[in-house]
Amino acid sequence: MTRVAGVLWLLLALFGCATPPAIVPPEAGERVALEARCRGIFLSRPWQLSHSIHYTAPGDRAGAMIGVVRIDPESGSVACNLLSPEGLLLVGAEACGEKVLVRRAITPFDDPDFLRGLLDDIRLVFLAPASPAGEMGFSTDGMLRCRYPSAGGGRVEAALHPAGGWEILRYDGLKRLARQVQASPTPPGSIPVRMSLAAPGVLGYRMEFTLLGAVPAPPAPDTGDCQGPLR
């Protein structure tokens, strides 16, 4: 392999090269019902969820954590605690309105980019896009796909499998896959028991989630203030 070819291969691996598949648009009268199905995979009321998390990262790193999240779809606020298997609080952070509060973050989890990405990933998984779908339709594999515009010219895609289960895919402005969320088949309106989240590329990572508990949470204050630490 030449040096130039090696550099090109590295860039492709680093940024990912998967692009959105082609879709066949539905009839105009079907759009409302189909988008309701896509939005049905996101939370519709406040919840506090607990998951066991197994992760793999570059450099043969792997491990386990406990994650507790509180999500309010109405306000868009999210809060997260990450704990070691022994119960040590590694991260405690909350995003509400324009505010981001970091109550605790120990090394190496105190990197601002990591914390921002963590909260963004929570929003991606659980909060429906604010705008209506720009495109929707069925791909050749039978999946219903609803595509929503996102910042920087990117898009978020909700994709429903014909036999159950779903995916959320986030593409950047160059249509490169940046995140892929996959969920096990779940009855409509239910919270998946198993999910995964992957970031592609040589610096990417993968996390596997198993649901431990789910309880309704109080709504966020109308003032836009943060609710406080997770209990």
Image: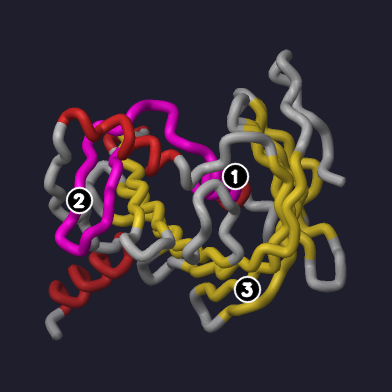
Front position in the image: 97 or 218: 218
Q: Where is residue 141? Give x, y as percent.
A: 20, 64
Q: Where is residue 230? Give x, y as percent.
A: 82, 44
Residue ranking furthest to the top: 223
Around disc 3, counting alpha carbons within 10 Å, would you say few (fewer than 14), some (14 to 19), or many (20 or more)? Answer: some
Q: Tell me whether the residue at label 3 lies in contact with that at label 2, contact meaning CB atoms closer than 8 angstroms.
A: no
Report whether 106 appears left or right of 115: right
User: Circle 1 is placed at which residue position?
Assistant: 119
- Whichever of callouts 2 and 1 sits on the residue coming sooner in the sequence is 1
Instruction: Give me the C-alpha separation between circle 3 and circle 1.
Output: 18 Å
Around disc 1, counting alpha carbons within 10 Å, would you say few (fewer than 14), some (14 to 19), or many (20 or more)? Answer: some
Amino acid beneath label 1: Leu
Q: Is residue 134 magenta?
A: yes
Q: Residue at x 73, y 64 (%)?
A: 212
Q: Is residue 202 magenta?
A: no
What's drawn in magenta, residue-wise?
A: 118-147
Q: Residue at x 71, y 15 (%)?
A: 222
Relative to 124, does residue 15 appear above or below in the rendering?
A: below
